């Protein structure tokens, strides 16, 4: 404000039309690419009424797809939570040879196409794969069954928790842990009482992202699923099947449930940020 | 330490989920389930067949039976079975895809002789689906190679229907040119220059044509074309029957290595027999598959256009030969499609 009186344009005060234009284009972009498609999903799902919508969701194959998606996420997400914490703890608190390689490996699922992630499991566990013939003779079915879906999902969602935690833990350094150890705490005590409380918000954030991807994954899961209706079809796969059967109302109904799960994840994240904003700001940047 | 406590509850939950799925998977392996791995356009047909067969099986004292379905491009489905998808029966678009499964050792190589009519309980053919009023005036195969006509067909590498499409075009060109293979190759090459997109399965191609409104003509299974007409209305689409087409024999087989391990042979064989029964044949006819039974073929004769049909055995010397010549890596399709790009 002082700057204005001096007659010079202040560096932090853009002209109003520039500001307006930027805000409008950002809003327009959001509307076009996020809000409209989302609304379209719900409009398409409900255009034959609530009854048709509900029927599509309680149909046995749809229920089984919803259940399967939840089961896969319920197994994959906790495993990746444990793995992610262990990996980032290891990487950020210790120095060892090959650390760079480990970080690269953790990032691998981000850079590899999901289809390839699926195919490697077929190559490993398929009937003509490396481990497939042995497992088959033992009566163990991995691909084209739930374990394959879980494996593919774990692979694809591998980096989410670790990627969220590594920068955070690196920034926090090791002083607090060192202090705890000097004061006589055991390794476990240090982890539970010092490290974990420090990272809990970052961890939660990583888990939410991991969960969203686990439920929405299509490519890798499609390769290992076998597409058996009512048995190995997750929600994204079920949406595709319904769409291909000209059953658009049902397809968009199931899609809307997926969208809602995503929205719940987002809302959970927003609520967390709002309620614990100060604490988050202290631990996340 | 509440956080710790919550974590252990979570861990217990995960453990139960894992146990539950494992148990669930074991229960699903019981004898009264059957997995039918099929190709793309049979979805609606097998929903009806499965319902009717389950009723009959229960009435005959076989108990309850749950039949699971898996659909996709025929070649892709065969690949999945070879890779270990536990199909009790395969009902695929063409014999070669089952030959491939036999080559992998999952069923005997003479599978085709085990059931009547080359193990094909129903037949079909390839027709054209065009937009209402036929704006590009497409009447026969030679209209498809004209410049400016966009033809939609799936990829012959993965889709059974697409291989029938391709061979139908080839057979037409042979008939027009005194069996000159070179001219047939040039004709099919010209045709594929007019193909803007290759979907992996017949249903994907139908959705591309009808929903996404791409292309002027869809080369489709007769049954798929009629189904599209039912779904999207005769006011939007029209079926054009070419002067000559190919007799498509979608084959079925029991996968021996799977049924013997699961103990489902009796059920699987009864299921395939049911397709040949009058009831099964009637369901086929209603879904626009040409029935084999004389009596039903006559009753539903007005549903199916009278086309001059050539067979794969006469014109191409059987599926194995056709596959090797045309669709194997480096085969004729690869040559013309690479060149066309």
Image (spheres, coloured by chain):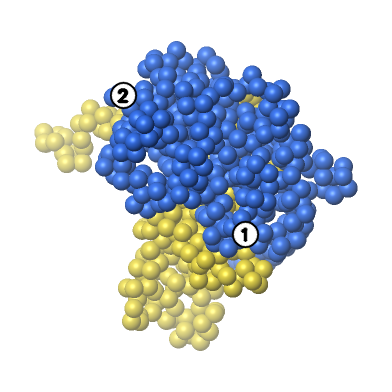
Chain colours: A yellow, B blue
Q: Earlier in the sequence, mark 1 or mark 2?
A: 1
Whole-angstrom CA distance, mark 1 to mark 2, is: 45 Å
Looking at the rendered image, the quarter that the N terminus of chain B falls into is: bottom right
Residue furthest left as drawn = A7
Q: Residue at x 51, y 42 (%)?
A: B313
Residue A221 is situated, as x and y percent measured from the top left of the image, at 52, 53
Residue depth check, mark 1 versus mark 2: number of the one nearer the observer: 1
Q: Up-down: is B33 above or below A56?
A: below
Q: Residue at x 42, y 81 (%)?
A: A178
Q: Residue at x 65, y 22 (%)?
A: B301
Question: In the structure shown, which secondary structural element does the residue marked by tag 1 occupy?
Answer: loop
The numbered mark at residue B108 is 1
Residue A55 is situated, as x and y percent measured from the top left of the image, at 69, 33
The numbered mark at residue B146 is 2
Q: Are marks 1 and 2 on the same chain?
A: yes
Question: In the structure shown, which secondary structural element does the residue marked by tag 2 occupy?
Answer: loop
Q: Nearer the viewer, residue A74 or B20?
A: B20
Q: Up-down: is B234 above or below A83?
A: above
> Taking B142 as reference, is B341 left or right?
left
């Amino acid at each position: 404000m002082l700057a204005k009186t001096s007659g010079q344009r202040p560096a932090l005060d853009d002209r109003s039309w520039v500001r307006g234009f930027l805000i409008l284009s950002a809003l327009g972009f959001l509307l076009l690419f996020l809000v409209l498609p989302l609304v379209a999903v719900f409009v398409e799902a409900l255009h034959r009424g609530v009854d048709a919508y509900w029927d599509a969701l309680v149909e046995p194959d749809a229920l089984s797809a919803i259940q399967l998606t939840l089961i896969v996420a319920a197994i994959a997400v906790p495993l990746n939570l444990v793995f992610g914490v262990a990996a980032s703890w290891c990487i950020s608190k210790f120095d060892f040879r090959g650390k760079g390689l480990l970080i690269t490996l953790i990032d691998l699922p981000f850079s590899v196409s999901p289809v390839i992630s699926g195919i490697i499991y077929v190559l490993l566990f398929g009937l003509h794969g490396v481990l497939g013939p042995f497992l088959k003779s033992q009566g163990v079915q991995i691909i084209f069954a739930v374990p394959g879906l879980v494996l593919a999902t774990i692979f694809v969602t591998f980096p989410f928790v670790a990627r969220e935690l590594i920068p955070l833990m690196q920034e926090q350094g090791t002083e607090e842990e060192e202090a705890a150890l000097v004061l006589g705490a055991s390794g476990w005590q240090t982890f539970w009482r010092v490290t974990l409380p420090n990272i809990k918000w970052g961890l939660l954030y990583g888990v939410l992202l991991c969960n969203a991807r686990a439920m929405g994954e299509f490519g890798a899961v499609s390769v290992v699923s076998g597409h058996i209706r009512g048995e190995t079809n997750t929600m994204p796969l079920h949406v595709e099947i319904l769409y291909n059967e000209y059953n658009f109302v049902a397809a968009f109904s199931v899609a809307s449930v997926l969208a809602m799960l995503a929205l719940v994840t987002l809302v959970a994240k927003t609520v967390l940020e709002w309620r614990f904003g100060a604490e988050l700001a202290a631990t996340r940047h | 330490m509440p956080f710790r406590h919550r974590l252990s509850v979570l861990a217990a939950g995960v453990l139960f989920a894992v146990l539950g799925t494992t148990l669930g998977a074991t229960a699903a392996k019981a004898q009264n389930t059957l997995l039918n791995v099929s190709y793309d356009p049979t979805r609606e047909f097998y929903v009806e067949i499965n319902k009717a067969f389950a009723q009959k099986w229960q009435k005959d004292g076989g108990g309850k039976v749950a039949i699971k379905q898996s659909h996709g491009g025929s070649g892709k489905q065969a690949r999945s079975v070879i890779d270990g998808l536990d199909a009790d029966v395969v009902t695929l678009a063409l014999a070669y895809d089952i030959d491939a499964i036999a080559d992998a050792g999952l069923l005997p190589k003479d599978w085709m002789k085990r059931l009547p009519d080359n193990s094909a309980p129903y037949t079909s053919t390839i027709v054209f689906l065009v937009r209402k009023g036929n704006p590009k005036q497409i009447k026969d195969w030679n209209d498809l190679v004209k410049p400016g006509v966009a033809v939609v067909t799936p990829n012959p590498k993965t889709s059974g229907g697409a291989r029938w499409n391709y061979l139908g075009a080839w057979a037409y060109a042979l008939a027009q040119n005194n069996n000159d293979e070179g001219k047939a190759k040039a004709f099919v090459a010209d045709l594929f220059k007019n193909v803007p997109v290759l979907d992996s399965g017949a249903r994907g191609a139908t959705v591309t044509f009808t929903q996404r409104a791409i292309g002027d003509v869809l080369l489709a299974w007769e049954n798929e074309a009629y189904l599209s007409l039912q779904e999207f209305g005769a006011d939007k689409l029209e079926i054009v029957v070419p002067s000559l087409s190919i007799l498509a024999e979608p084959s079925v087989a029991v996968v021996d290595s799977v049924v013997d391990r699961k103990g489902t042979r009796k059920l699987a064989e009864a299921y395939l027999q049911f397709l040949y029964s009058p009831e099964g044949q009637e369901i086929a006819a209603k879904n626009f598959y040409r029935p084999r039974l004389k009596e039903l073929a006559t009753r539903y004769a007005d549903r199916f256009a009278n086309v001059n049909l050539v067979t794969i055995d006469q014109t191409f010397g059987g599926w194995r030969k056709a596959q090797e010549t045309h669709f194997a890596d480096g085969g004729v399709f690869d040559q013309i499609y690479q060149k066309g790009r």
